[in-house]
Amino acid sequence: MYSVIKSVSFDATDALVLARFWASALGSDVDEDSTADKAFVEASGWGAPNIWFTRVPEPKAAKNRVHFDLRAPGLMADEVARLEALGATVLQRFDHLVSMRDPEGNEFCVEPGPTEI
């Protein structure tokens, strides 16, 4: 038997702000007991990991060594625009991938959806 990923944890300047971004990005909700110090987002799909956010005193200082790769539900350009409206920024655009940052600077990628593969 092997381990499974139960949750992913993020350090944050404001746990609630970052949790709201990722809940919106992933189609989930922020737990009602969440605060700026600690916040929780339950996975929107069965088997996906939950996400914890914890306030830490220091800001993000370097490139993430681990990041999310998101698959767009439709057109990649539409998903990138939606994430930008939520507060993400584009780092770099490639033919089949867009590298982005969440509101606290954590890197993630958006890949083409099933209609573009």
Image (cartoon, grey):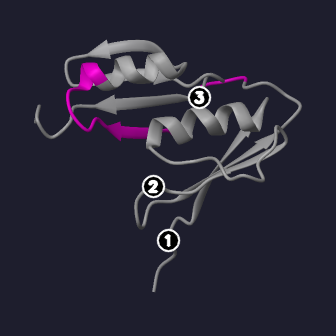
- Helix, strand or loop at mark 1: loop
Q: Nearer the viewer, residue 85 or 99?
A: 85
Dot 3 alpha-carbon crowd within 10 angstroms: few under 14, some 14 to 19, many 20 or more = many
Inspect the image, locate mark 2, and give the three-letter code of the amino acid beneath it. Ser
In space, the residues marked 1 and 2 are separated at their CA atoms by 17 Å
Q: Which residue is mark 1?
A: 4
Q: Which residue is mark 3?
A: 106
| Residues rendered magenta in the picture | 61-78
Inspect the image, locate mark 1, and give the three-letter code of the amino acid beneath it. Val
Question: Which quarter of the rendering shows the N terminus?
Answer: bottom left
Identity of the residue drawn at 36% across and 17% down: 81
Q: Residue 19 location in percent, x, y?
A: 65, 39
Q: Which residue is mark 2?
A: 44
Which numbered disc, 3 or 2, marks the residue that appears first in the sequence? Answer: 2
Question: Which quarter of the rendering shows the C terminus?
Answer: top left
Q: Is residue 39 visible?
A: yes
Q: Is residue 105 magenta?
A: no
Taking 68 as reference, is 61 above or below it? above
Inspect the image, locate mark 3, and give the three-letter code of the amino acid beneath it. Asn
111 vs 19, left or right, is left
Q: Residue 116 location in percent, x, y?
A: 11, 31
Q: Residue 18 location in percent, x, y?
A: 66, 33
